[in-house]
Amino acid sequence: MAELTADQIAKQDKVSGKAWGILAVTYLASFCAPLCQFKIPPLASWLFPAFHGALDSVTFGTLMSAIAIIGVVLAFPAAFIARRMGLKNVILLSVACLGVGSALGGLTNDLAVLMGSRLLEGVGIGLIGVAAPSCVTIWFPERKRGLALGIWATWVPVGSVVAFNTAPAIAGAFGYQAVFFAIAAVCAVAFVLFALVYKMPPGATGDMGVEGTFKESLKYCKNRRIWILGAVFFLFAFTTIGIMNTYYNTFLETQLGFDAQTASTLSSVIMFLSLIVAPLTGFVSDRLPLGRKYIVGLVMMLLLIPTGFFMFYTGNGAIAVMWVTIVLQGVGGGMCGGSLRPMAPMLMRNTAMGATMAMAIMQLCQNLGSAVGSPLFGAVMSQTGWQTASLVLQLPAYVLAFILCFFILPRGKNVKKLDDVPAEEAWPSGF
């Protein structure tokens, strides 16, 4: 029997077994990215002494921001790279970069080489985040794509939870290099499985719906609202990925006295809560009229603002404050992924290119935020202390993001859809 074409798959009511297999190997390939990205924070206790003083708070933060820097560079060209190389080849290239980068990091005791390995991993992360969703969607019927992408979207929180919980155990038993090699082995398995299982359905071009040239796509960057949403993402990534995900684990060890394994497990609770909250927030946000969706962003930032005061608190009742921080960060962070990110393609209606550029702007702002946040916090913290650095950097960022949430989308109970907004407001000619 002839295989269904991509157009026929899109119109089906049932999901084929092959589609679930495609989702499985794409998920495994994607899962490798957060394993690589988040292996560094739980290994702080091993990395600092291993590099004999060459590693300090600033350079430790740079190990995390190195990946984000490549994400900034690839944010806009990634879709065009995928269109030229083909989706399958881009995923294989991504996983190869992740595996080789991780193995290279395990083989070196030179900080510059380790930094280079992180840049190589950043290439893999930057490409896979753009190509993987399209790999999934072309195999699923239109009515089932939300479910498929909802499952795929757990790759980052699941990968980070696994990294934070397994890295200290492996390092404690076999040395920190074993973590790098173990992740490289996972990447190798993912590479082989994806190469064997994945193929494009007949009639699928793999061009991700990107029409026109890169130069032509830049006209979509004139949309004012997408940059406001991008600014919120910058601030969120600056504080959450750049600061909390990078340094909270080290804070729990060095300031509150937890051992490396316990500190990593506590940090992973934040990601686990986000994993639960994100789809629930998306469910709620989908049911709010357009003119009320901004409320979700306000609630999110109201939850995060208090952590700017006490995330790095060490006084009386520090353990109770720690648990409040974990809950607020987990719930607030999950609300960001479940409510604000889906607004990006909504703001760039009418064309696939517009939606693609919207997501590129989100990637740019998110990676730029984390790239700046990690080394900047390390520098300020080393001069002023943990809590002062949080007050100076995190608190203003959360407050500013709260204010910007009022301006992402048009407000008002009568605004039901973006088409209700005058064209000149939705597509302003300039800034």
Image: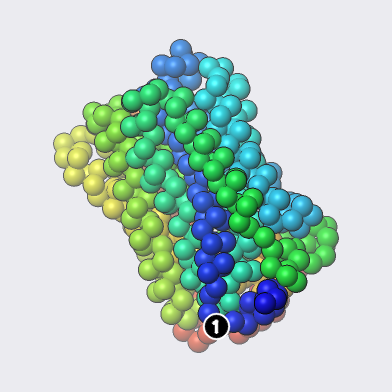
Who's the residue at 68% across and 74% down the image?
3
Q: Can you identify the residue that label 1 sits on?
A: 13
Is residue 170 depicted above or below 285 in this figure? above
**Residue farthest left in this picture:** 316
Q: Position of residue 301 (x, y in %)?
A: 40, 58
Given the image, on which type of amino acid does mark 1 rest?
Asp
Foreground of the two, 52 or 173: 173
Who's the residue at 63% across and 78% down the image?
10
**Does the image show residue 318?**
yes
Q: Secondary structure at mark 1?
A: loop
Foreground of the two, 305 or 67: 67
**Does the image show residue 298?**
no
Q: Position of residue 134 (x, y in %)?
A: 64, 63
* Mark 1 neighbour class, 10 Å CA radius: few under 14, some 14 to 19, many 20 or more: few
Is residue 201 depicted above or below 58 in this figure? below
Q: Position of residue 212 (x, y in %)?
A: 82, 65
Who's the residue at 29% across and 33% down the image?
261
Q: The C terminus is located in which quarter? A: bottom right
User: Taking 271 as reference, is 75 left or right?
Assistant: right
**Residue farthest front in this picture:** 1
The colour style of the image is rainbow
**Residue farthest top in this picture:** 52
